[in-house]
Image (cartoon, coloured by chain):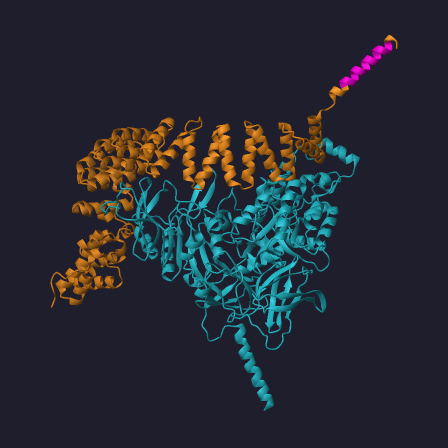
Amino acid sequence: MNGFHARLFIVFILVLLLGIRLLPDDDEHITMLLRDKHYSKAFRKLKERFAAGDRQRFTLMRLYELHELYGNEEEMQRMLAIFRAKHPDDIFVQEKLADLFFRTSQYERYLNQLELLIKKAPKREYAEKLIARLELNGDITRERKLLEKFQSLPFFSAEHAGRLGLIELNSGNNRAALRHLKRMDQIDQNNQELSVPRLALFRLLLKTGQADEAANRAGKWIRRGQNVQNLFLLMTMQLQERGRNDLAIRLATDAQRQNSAPLFYLVEYLVRRRQILQARILLDNWRNGTAKPSNRERARYIVLQLEAQNPLAAIAELNATGIQNISADDLVKIGEELALQNQTALLRTLQPFFHLKALQRRPLFAAKLFAREGKSKLAAYFLKKTPVATLRPYVQMDWVATFNSVHGDRKTLITLREMKRNGKLSRHLLKGYAELAGKLGEKNDYESAWIALGGMPARRLR
Amino acid sequence: MIRFRILFTVLMGVAFFSGFTHATPSVRSVPVKRKILALYDGTRFKDSADTFIHKLAEMPLNYLGLDVRYQDINKGLPAIDDLDDFRGVITWFGREVKNGNAWLHWADRASQAGLKFLILGDIGAKTDDTTLPLVNRFLARLGIRLENRYVSDTIGTRIIDLDKKIIGFERPLPEVMPPYTLFTATNSQTRVHLSVSPPRRTALPAGSMSFTDKKAVLVTSNSGGGFVQSSYALYYDNRLNRDKWLVNPFEYFKTVFGINQFPVPDVTTLSGRRMYFSHIDGDGWNNVSFIERYRKTLTLSSEVMLRELIAPYPDLPVTVALVTGDFDASIGGNPDAAKIARKIFALDQVEVGSHTHTHPFNWEFYDKYNRHLELEMVEKQAKNSSARGSGIIALLQGLLKKPTPRQKNIKYIAGSGDMPRAYMKKPFNTEQDITVSLKLAESLAPKGKTARLMQWSGNTRPFEAAIRAARLAGVYNMNGGDPRFDVEYSSIAYLSPLSRMVGNERQIYAAASNENYYTNDWTGPFYAFSNLVKTLENTENPRRLKPFNLYYHTYSAERQASLKAVKSHLERARHGRYTPVPASEYAAIADSFFKVEIRQINDHSWTIHNRGHLQTLRFDNAVKLEVDWRNSRGLIGSTRHQNALYIALDARRKSPLVVLKHIPNTRRGKTYSVEKSPRPVLNDSRWKIDNLTYDQSGFRFRAQGFGQGDMSWRGLKSGACSIIVKRGSRLLWKKTANIPRTGQLNFSIAADARTAPVYVSINYAPRMPGIERSLEH
């Protein structure tokens, strides 16, 4: 062989070797088959490799994909399980397995797989899926265990802490609840929205004698809270109940900058508890601090001042507001309060401005008004309109008294008798019924009333 | 004289035998009220199908045998006199309605007239101090009173009463009780299913007593009806957007509406077995299948469907509903594909249906149709589309070969479900899409085989005129509802009711979801339709809530995985204990549910009238009850599933008489798989059975169905017998068998009864005199 032929031969061998080198290996071949959609061929090759003990990622993954293509769920699951055992840190496969369990309604396996996934890759999204499912199905025991486990993980949020706190609270573990709820408040310090866990925290702090801390925290929440006036009122009242009026007033004053309703509710409460002075102070503070109250707020303020036995302030506000700016219903409410306070002269001034429809919505007040003026027909009309059965007991007695003043004893007795027959005579009115019967000498009524009361008559009628 | 005697005898005979088919005229019977009026706020819910009542409450009400009729409260309240045949009223407003006071006044009068009221959530009226007396006047009829205080911070709430039969159905009460309004019970007649003691610090109205010592009621019932506070009927998780019932709607609705035992018209069971039916929407008909062995030959999905899912299953009925536009070249269809339709319709197990002509996706668009707007959408689609054969590529293709009808009309063919319908070349026409489409589908079937079902397309919200057109064309209709009950939708809240009323027309819902809902709108994973099995399991136990419905599209044959999933369900239907029926038959039965009239004679007897195609009645909690076969009329058989007793009626008997009796103590606690009876009674059958007659020599009946005629009878005389199956005079099948002393006989008829019924006679072998045995107990 001459030199040229030798060089040619060497080049040929090199090219041959290069060609062989460039031949696709088995993996590449399978990939090409799959790319060209020759699935059955690829499947055959892969099954052969698997049968020969091949457990490489490539083989397992391609087999899984083909089983998915063919809808072989059991084999899909098997491949992923083998993959997971061989490559436990492969998150993609863990996710796939969770998804498979979910789509084939293997609930317990799905939950277990999610737990495993969180262990491997502590991501919030996995935790949310798991916690949400447990919470939806009411599996509190498991949820609690998991949340406890999650405490040390980076995705553990205020929501998780709050939830754990509430679960502990519901189980009566107050100490643990307090710990978790405080942590919740700490984590969420940049978002001072009032929430159910925060309310729970507030309550627990009060229960454990930490009223100052409770009020301080509540003060922060109030400044950012929206549409939660009733809740602030409740917190205020809880402070009240523990004898911390100072904190309650401070909280209510803080709250009223957002919305007057909590403060007004608190004033009502103070009036009922006969804490008139404090009620007035709050009202004055509010008025002084509120530049442009709405007409509704003014009307409420007027009523509350009357309830707080401060008619001068009420009248001053009414004059400043102008009767024409007070709604028909509010005007009647003011009238009712004036009547209660025996402010007859003022009531008479307002009376011409009462609308009939507004009076119809407060029929008992209207009846009393007209009864006082001797307009018995009108009074009778409104008495009839009053839904007696739905009134509270002391108000029912008020109705009976007014009825009596309009219709007299005899008719009152007949009416009470009828109400008793129809089962509409409340226990509170039975005694009055008995007394009236006794006054009129109606023996049957008298005795039946006492029998209904379950006692012996005060005296026997002959 | 003789003539007189003959006439007299005949007349006496008529009078005597008429007693067997009708309740004795002199016996008073009372109609069982089955209607419930559902009031909803049309300003909040445009369609009654969007209301909470329809989505959540109607299914359990249907299960209890009740027919829910909707009324938009803003369109006026019905005259109370017109509600004589209504049992009660249900509301689930969610908020105040416009004329709240008018509603309360009406409710008060209606309650006084005897209607029971179920108020779920918001009362629907303003509840301030001025309206409170009116509110409480009505609520007093429900045995409750509104104290009009709201407990928003519920921490510290203590549960006082908890009726475990009613509360905690799918989930226990939430760990933090939802906020609630203070209601109290007004008297001891009020049954309190859930009550709590509010936390001590509840805000108090002026001058009132403390509520700390009073019970706040959350779920109640009494003779006037019932009340469930907002957030206490269902638990809702906003992360998963899923509901779960807190209240047991089956038990609670039964209590509230005062439902005592009556035979419930059942639409899940036929001849003692769970019904099976299958229907296919024709979407994807012209798509080439991706399945490897078919892809190479460019086989259409419809052909694959025929070869793999229909032809190999002659024992399973299936309704195939074509999108007839798929064959209409003038709008872009492929006329060649009609050949496949002909082959499919030629098969005896296949029923003809239509899936409309142009496949509306958005039916509301066509209710108030605007062609101009539709064309604008077409133009916009054409502009946005770049990969749909437009431009240079299309031009080149057009030069090389003749464009297909689809290519010619591509501009007018929807590229996605965002368009209002699939084929938009011609203006929409209800007649074309319903009536003509049915005729077109029928034209591809053998002569004499008519179209039987209209299957709604797209969002399955057809308008009234469309449903009417189907009815006037003489077919039933189906689709929509899409129920599921599995891990992803883990509540009966996701099971749809039987139907949807649209004006005066009724749309029957499918009894299962199709593969679309399992595969993320057909984007994968394509195996996921196999998960239907979970819904089937959950709707079978502990209550049979739905029949087995296999519902899919032609495009399931595009993918190997989806094909396999469908096959797995077909195998289940083939080998399971079902009664397969055509889909139109299910639709007919479901439709008949609403027409059935039941008259109660006494505590344990009823007559059934006007039942149409419905042939099964059900009694729940019937462990201690059995059929009184001696006194009942027009019944074929009975069977049990869980605690329910299912009774099969004879379709040939117009007004059956159902009489029950209590099982004697001596027999209680024993298994009832072989219940005794004094005459031949069907346990269950794969075929429909009717026209049952019997005498001392045996019994006879007519049967029709799919697959082998597996059946089980009891109450037979022991000994040898022959089973003869004929059609007319032609003998189809014959067998001898031996009936054991139990009197039960199971056999399987190998004859084709798919398209025409067969007549079956079981004749007892003649006995030697003196060796007569009776199985009567």
Q: Quadrant of residue B681?
A: bottom right
Q: State which chain is coloured cyan.
A: B
Up/down of B104 relative to A157, above or below: below
Q: Give the range drawn in magenta.
A: A4-18
Q: Does the magenta stretch include residue B695?
A: no
Residue A123 coordinates in the image, percent (x, y) = 48, 28
> What tint does the image give chain A?
orange
Residue shown at 45% from the left, 45% from the top: B244
**Is B173 left or right of B323, judged from the image as shown?**
left
Residue B771 coordinates in the image, percent (x, y) = 59, 75
User: Can residue B376 be seen by looking at this rendering?
Assistant: no
Residue shown at 59% from the left, 77% from the top: B770
Q: Quadrant of residue B610?
A: bottom right
**Location of the N terminus of chain B (image quadrant):** bottom right
**Is B117 left or right of A391, judged from the image as shown?**
right
Q: Does the magenta stretch include residue A15?
A: yes
Q: Nearer the viewer, residue B767 or A439?
A: B767
Q: Which of B36 and B623 is in front in this view?
A: B623
Residue B315 coordinates in the image, percent (x, y) = 67, 55
In this view, which residue lies farthest toward the right?
Answer: A1
**Is B333 left or right of B60, judged from the image as shown?**
right
